[in-house]
Image (cartoon, helix red, strand yellow):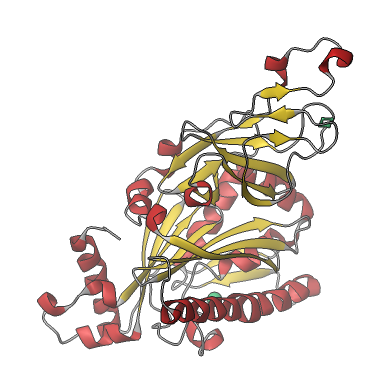
């Protein structure tokens, strides 16, 4: 990471002050959110439509299709998406359906190919989405190939991520959308990291699951043997960049800096950064040798979600020891997310309609949740 050292120092300074005083960044007051925000199917449909189907979502790491002619196909919120890097190095996004009669051009997954040939009647398309072959064309009748290119989705490549809108007409300006968050993301150098594993995890409703990505209040109680083991619980340093947020957690070793001169701090050793891009991308743990990129998508119903986890290491492993370190990070993350966060999330989901709560309460020590849910309401209303 080439984040400005001074910036890390100032973040460490804020974190150390909290550790010394046993405090954390706080909101002005507590905030109540009606449980309907998690339950109501109409509200859910409106939020998915107005947020997830309109704003640019980071659908993939740019390094997933690093080479020309590489592609990744993924179904996102019911939209079959095909991301392709052309011979010209440009990443493009298409709806993964053939323009003849709608068969998917390729199955979900990653690969490299010179042409996309439809399995149904063998029409074929190149990396720019152009229709370049029609099987039995002399028998088919007149068509206008230019009008039968794959349907493109708006896309921008920025900060090592591929940002895509799920509707063909939802054009966006990625710089306007990210604002001051863009340099924060750029500084992570995500494109330089190596993806060593990817997987999908089913979770409870999108908000129940996502809430856990935004606060450190639960670290000690829920994660004592995994991600909370080395993390100071209930201490966050938070900055908002429009709807996006950067969260700083302290490693337990941070307490050792309280009485050390700043010149000896080496802040990167003692803090961890989480970059949370609205509405569903979390880049977690950067500064160490491993990081977790999570994309969390609402499921078909309000009580289910799907998380795409990408596990990254700073350099591709060469030795057994490096491979073992990757495997240990992978199993720790899986345990924390699936067996701890989502396990309690499914239980929360079960109890949502019980009437035990008419609203949930976000503490002053959960300013990130307050910020997130205010933005959800604001964008769903707009
Ligand atoms: S549906 Fe693709 S060629 Fe017919
Ligand atoms: Fe958690």
Foreground residue among 97 and 238: 97
Quadrant (top left, top right, bottom left, bottom right) of the N terminus: bottom left
Image coordinates of residue 117 in percent, x first then y, are 74, 35
Ligand 1 rendered quadrant: top right
Residue drawn at point x = 57 percent, y = 67 percent: 211
Residue 343: which quarter of the image? Answer: bottom right
Image coordinates of residue 45 in percent, x first then y, are 74, 48
Residue drawn at point x = 27 percent, y = 72 percent: 268
Task: Identify whether 301 is placed above or below 89.
Answer: below
Q: Is residue 250 left or right of residue 142?
A: left
Task: Identify whether 30 is placed above or below 3.
Answer: below
Residue 382 seen from this side = no
Image coordinates of residue 361 in percent, x first then y, are 58, 71
**How many numbered dots are placed on residues in this image?**
0
Foreground residue among 313 and 337: 313
Residue drawn at point x = 85 percent, y = 29 percent: 101
Quadrant (top left, top right, bottom left, bottom right) of the C terminus: top right
Q: Residue furthest right?
A: 139
Image coordinates of residue 75 in percent, x first then y, are 71, 49
């Amino acid at each position: 990471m080439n984040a400005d050292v001074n910036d890390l120092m100032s973040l460490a300074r804020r974190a150390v002050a909290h550790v010394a005083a046993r405090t954390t960044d706080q909101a002005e007051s507590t905030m109540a959110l009606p449980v309907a925000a998690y339950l109501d199917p109409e509200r859910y449909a409106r939020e998915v439509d107005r947020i997830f189907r309109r704003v640019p979502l980071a659908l993939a790491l740019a390094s997933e299709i690093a080479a020309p002619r590489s592609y990744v196909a993924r179904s996102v919120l019911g939209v079959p998406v095909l991301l392709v890097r052309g011979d010209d190095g440009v990443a493009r996004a298409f709806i993964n359906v053939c323009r003849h009669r709608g068969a998917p051009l390729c199955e979900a997954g990653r690969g490299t190919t010179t042409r996309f040939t439809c399995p149904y009647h063998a029409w074929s398309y190149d990396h720019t989405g152009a229709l370049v072959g029609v099987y039995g064309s002399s028998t088919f009748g007149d068509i206008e190939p230019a009008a039968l290119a794959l349907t493109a989705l708006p896309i921008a490549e920025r900060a090592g991520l591929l940002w895509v809108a799920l509707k063909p007409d939802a054009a966006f300006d990625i710089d306007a959308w990210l604002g001051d968050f863009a340099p924060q993301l750029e500084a992570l150098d995500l494109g330089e990291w190596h993806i060593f594993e990817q997987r999908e995890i089913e979770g409870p409703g999108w908000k129940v699951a996502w809430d856990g990505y935004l606060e450190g209040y639960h670290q000690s109680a829920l994660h004592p043997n995994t991600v909370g083991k080395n993390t100071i619980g209930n201490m966050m340093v938070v900055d908002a960049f429009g709807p996006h947020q950067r969260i700083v957690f302290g490693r337990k070793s941070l307490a050792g800096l309280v009485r050390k001169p700043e010149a000896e701090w080496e802040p990167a050793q003692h803090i961890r950064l989480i970059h949370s891009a609205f509405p569903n991308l979390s880049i977690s743990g950067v500064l160490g040798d491993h990081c977790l990129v999570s994309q969390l998508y609402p499921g078909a119903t309000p009580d289910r979600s799907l998380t795409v986890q990408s596990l990254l290491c700073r350099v591709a492993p060469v030795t057994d020891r490096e491979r073992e370190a990757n495997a240990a990070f992978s199993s720790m993350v899986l345990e924390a997310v699936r067996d701890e966060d989502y396990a309690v999330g499914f239980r929360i989901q079960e109890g949502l309609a019980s009437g035990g709560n008419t609203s949930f309460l976000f503490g002053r020590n959960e300013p990130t949740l307050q910020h997130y849910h205010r933005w959800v309401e604001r964008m769903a209303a707009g």
